[in-house]
Amino acid sequence: MGKEIESDEFKKLITLGEEKGFLTYDDVNDLLPSDVISSDQIDDIIMLFGEKNIDIIDTDKGEKLLVKKSPDERTEGKTDDILALLPALGKTGDPVKMYLREMGMVSLLSREGEVEIAKKIEEGARESMVAVFSVASSIKGVVELGAQLKRGDIRVKSLLENIEDEDGIVEEDMHLDRVLKLLDKITALDGKNDLLKKKLNAKVLAADERKKLKTALEKNIRNIVDLCRKIRFSKRQIDRMVANLRLYLIDVEKAEADVHRCKAEIGLSLAQMENAWAKMNKSVKSAGQAVRETGVPLEKLKATEKVIKDANRVFKRVTRETGLSVT
């Protein structure tokens, strides 16, 4: 465990997990230090939770995420709003959503979860891997692994699954050359995608040009997914990427909950709140008018504005870093 995550908050998280035998998403989100963001830190945390037999579950009731549900029941739940936002690449949309839905229900730290996910991969559900490797943050993580490999910070055997020969000997040089070539191609495609995204973000863009750019972007992502599959990343590396995605999911779910709570507390729609905030920030007189019209105290309106703006910042950050729309 690195020094950077040996904080009081993290110790409290471990203590809480040991006392209860599990942690909820809210526990992790509330107590995990905000500076824990790197893949190595997340991997350390996952390994430590596993060593201490601490499961990550969905509710304080202790309901494990691995549950048997009918296909209809699996379409329900808190993760569906987020999953519905995943962009379909060709005909892979449904398998992608299915895979992430399973990730939302299966703890990566439980043996049952590992077996469940391994089966999906082993049974040939190749489309499922699109859910990991098509997300912008995962691609950036793969590119960073390539940079670390070139610098000698990591060894190729730490990235791959079952590369020993029959005698248990690992020919790292052979795999290193193969993996570096694939990672170079991924890095080049990712650079092209960055340029395509900049063009797509242009304020003035003809519809046919936008369609052309999006088609090129999706083609590059499909190529990146194929290259990632050829690398044959170890389950540990894939778990690390999935852990990152699940942290984004936690952030979005918490922000969504904050928005819903604010709307319920003051009984106003988002449009009504925005109208009240505009008046509140215009002048003292207008602020008084907003209070009279809504029946909500001024301090409550101010507090609500902050919560909603903070939530919107979370949505924008997740969209920027993952490429997924959450609004």
Image (spheres, rainbow, N blue to C red):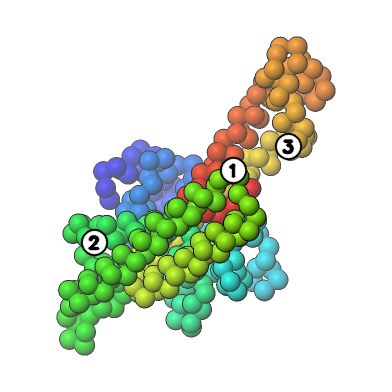
- Please give the residue where the numbered disc 2 appears in the rendered image: 149
Q: Are marks 1 and 2 in contact (CB under 8 Å)?
A: no
Q: Quick one: which residue is furthest to the right in this view? A: 293
Residue drawn at (45%, 53%) of the image: 195
Q: Residue at 59% of width from left, 56% of height from top?
A: 209
Q: Nearer the viewer, residue 13 or 151?
A: 151
- Establish if 279 lies above or below 264: above
Give residue 159's mark: none
Measure how far apart labels 2 and 3 are at the Cα level: 48 Å
Identify residue type, mark 1: Lys
- Residue 257 placement: quadrant: top right
- Kind of residue at disc 2: Leu
Indicate the amino acid at tag 3: Leu
Q: Position of residue 100 (x, y in %)?
A: 54, 65
Q: Secondary structure at mark 1?
A: loop
Q: Residue at x 31, y 75 (%)?
A: 161
Which mark sits nearer the N-terminus, 2 or 3?
Answer: 2
Please tell me whether mark 3 or mark 1 is closer to you in this view. Answer: 1
Where is residue 171? Give x, y as percent. 17, 78
Residue 236: percent from left, percent from top:
35, 66
> In the figure, is residue 220 to the left or right of 324?
left
Numbered mark located on residue 270 in the image: 3
Q: Foreground residue, 108 or 244? A: 244
- Circle 2: element type: helix
Tag 3's secondary structure?
Answer: helix
Instruction: Find residue 203 and name its label.
Output: 1
Mark 2 vs mark 3, foreground winner is 2
- 1 or 2: tag closer to the N-terminus: 2
Look at the picture and state if 311 lies above or below 239.
Answer: above
224, 83: nearer the viewer: 224
